[in-house]
Image (spheres, helix red, strand yellow):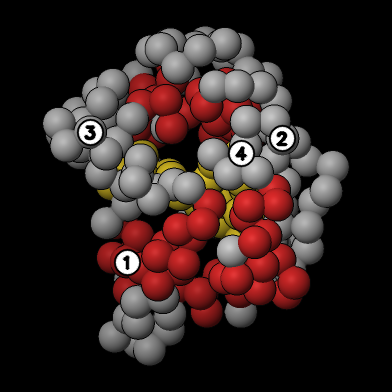
Amino acid sequence: MAKAFKRIFIIFLENKSEQAVLDNAFMKSLASRGVRLRKYFGVTHPSQPNYIAATAGLSFVVDDNRHDIDATNIVDLLEAKGVSWKAYMEDLPETNKTIHISKNRLYFRKHNPFVSFDNVRNSPSRLAKVVNAKRLQEDAKNNALPQYSWYTPNIQFRRATNMKRVIILADAISPSQKTLRWQLTAAAGSVFFTSNTPARSHPFR
């Protein structure tokens, strides 16, 4: 991976068609500056199977219910090659990372594929890398971003047309005057936005 990108940051969105995403001026500007992967599609409906497929290659499930999955996943592949990783989840309760729905009803487990895998959920060292998204700014300030990052906005903001909010959040300047965006892009980094829609998904970077 390091031969192509030193850092990859995936932001997983959904519930808007490709055209609706591109009708948004901010998202359209991102698409015009990046690369659209036109042959990348969501695999099915509802949400959870797409999140699982994005991290394991197969959907394994067909609904949004709680599932405990014994399968090889992206974490296995990353760690086998010594690639650092972390998953940032908005409104994830840090004291109960396997909860189905947070008390404020902004975090849903179906949008966090990592905790569905037995070898992540049952591993203290791995589960420690699935964190509340507030940790993102802290990691940026400490120049501690992993090589592979996953970001799931909460239920209010995961729709693709609200993506500008995530970028504003991510651009907080650290004491060293290095922004998160600088850390991601200056060192051969790449940011992938996926818009998982009811019919198909087109990401761009």
Determine which quarter of the picture holds residue 94.
top left
Q: Residue at x 28, y 21 (%)?
A: 100
Determine which quarter of the picture holds residue 74.
top right
According to the picture, the residue beneath numbered tag 3 turns out to be 105
| Contact, mark 1 vs mark 4 (Cβ under 8 Å) | no
Instruction: Name the residue furthest bottom.
Output: 177
According to the picture, the residue beneath numbered tag 1 turns out to be 137
- Disc 2/disc 3 C-alpha distance (Å): 26 Å
Query: Is tag 2's residue or tag 3's residue first in the polypeptide sequence?
Result: 3
Residue 106 image offset from top left, x and y in percent: 27, 39
**Viewer-nearest of labels 1 and 3?**
3
According to the picture, the residue beneath numbered tag 2 turns out to be 200
Three-letter code for the amino acid on which mark 1 is drawn: Gln
Left or right: 139, with 76 as reference point: left
Residue 65 image offset from top left, x and y in percent: 41, 12
Label 4 crowding class (10 Å Cα cut-off): few <14, some 14-19, many 20+? many
Nearest to the observer: residue 114 or residue 14 = 14
Q: Is residue 144 visible?
A: no
**Viewer-nearest of labels 1 and 4?**
4
Residue 38 image offset from top left, x and y in percent: 83, 48
Three-letter code for the amino acid on which mark 4 is drawn: Asn
- Disc 2/disc 4 C-alpha distance (Å): 6 Å
Determine which quarter of the picture holds residue 115.
top left
- Disc 2/disc 1 C-alpha distance (Å): 31 Å
| Contact, mark 2 vs mark 4 (Cβ under 8 Å) | no
According to the picture, the residue beneath numbered tag 4 turns out to be 196
Left or right: 54, with 46 as reference point: right
Query: Which type of secondary structure does the marked residue at label 4 adopt?
Result: strand
